[in-house]
Amino acid sequence: MPMALPFELPPLLKHPDTRSKSFLVLIATLLVLRSRLLPTRLLQTFEGRHHLSPKELEEAQQQLYYDQPDGSKRLLVPHRGNVKEVTIVPTPPSKFEADKKHYPPLKDDHRVNVDRAFVKQLSAILRIVFPSWRSKQVGIVALHSAFLVLRTLLSVAVARLDGKIVRALVSADGKGFVKGLGLWFALAVPSTYTNSMLRHLQSKLALHLRTRLSRYTNDLYLSSAPDLRYYRVGPEGGLEGVDQYVTTDIAAFCESLSALYGNMMKPTLDMFIFTAQLARSLGLF
């Protein structure tokens, strides 16, 4: 015998089929609200926590990312028992429209060479990887330049110390020889640190350049309607191996670009600083 309810059901819920449909609608609404509230609940859970439970990590892996009000996306990346947030800011379409003038189409008979067209293309790419003078990339380049100057100065100091050690050895000055040898080992500490920082900053610069260029290229290549460049580039008569261009070739280009700066700056600094030190030693100024 059905139990009497202490309240009157609405007319739509008195029929069994209607009640079943209403129950399904209610469940679907709760699931949608749960998915909307999950990012906030995850953030509140992750804040101030050093290690998460396996269940919380599983929730982060299922969520993957969530959208921000400004159009960006925040990735939830599990890392050492916690979750790191990575913000992905898409390139606005207005940026592509403003950059069209920097990419003029080349002639069909154009040959790849270091000419005016090459300089224009390189300058257009540099505008992407170095968006402004206050960007992180410019700061890394400035810090890298400072360590290049420091390494050259350390090379000058080591050269002078080598001369003093040889002079003490020839003159049989044991005290001076031991003192010079101690200073030589002491200079090995900042020299090793400087060389390690130069390699680290070069790798970090290549990573930042690759991030900027890959973000721009992927947003341009995987554009939404009505552009759909992904389907317009690949057909017959278009570019071949586009996937390699936007992955492997970009990584190789950024590695070469970051190494090119150091390889050009070091001999230039060595020439100027060594020339100045030699002129000072000769008494020219």
Image: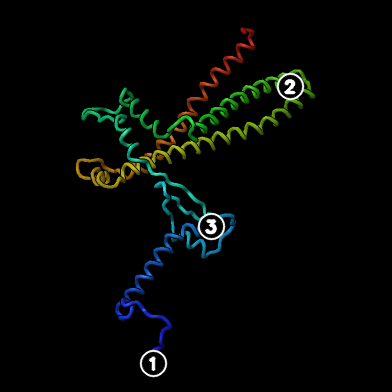
Of callouts 2 and 3, the N-terminal one: 3
Alpha-carbon distance for marks 2 and 3?
68 Å
Secondary element type, mark 2: helix
The kind of secondary structure element at disc 1 is loop
Which residue in the structure is indicated by mark 1? 1
Image mark for residue 169: 2
Near-viewer residue (106 or 33): 33
Q: Position of residue 154 (x, y in %)?
A: 63, 26
> Image point 21% across, 28% down: which residue?
109
In the image, farthest residue toward the top: 284
Q: Earlier in the sequence, mark 1 or mark 2?
A: 1
Disc 2 crowd rating (10 Å Cα; few below 14, some 14-19, many 20+) is some
Quadrant including the C terminus: top right
Give the residue number, with chain letter if any, for mark 3.
44
Q: Residues within 10 Å of mark 1 (few under 14, many from 20)?
A: few
Q: Number of labelled discs?
A: 3
**Residue 32 position in % (x across, y down):** 39, 63
**Could you tell me the amino acid type at mark 3?**
Gln
Q: Which mark is residue 165?
A: none
- Amino acid type of the residue that numbered disc 1 sits on in the rendered structure: Met
Place residue 237 in its image quadrant.
top left
Asked if the residue at tag 2 contacts the one at tag 1, i.e. Cβ–Cβ closer than 8 Å, the answer is no
Where's the N terminus, which quadrant?
A: bottom left
Q: Nearer the viewer, mark 1 or mark 2?
A: 1
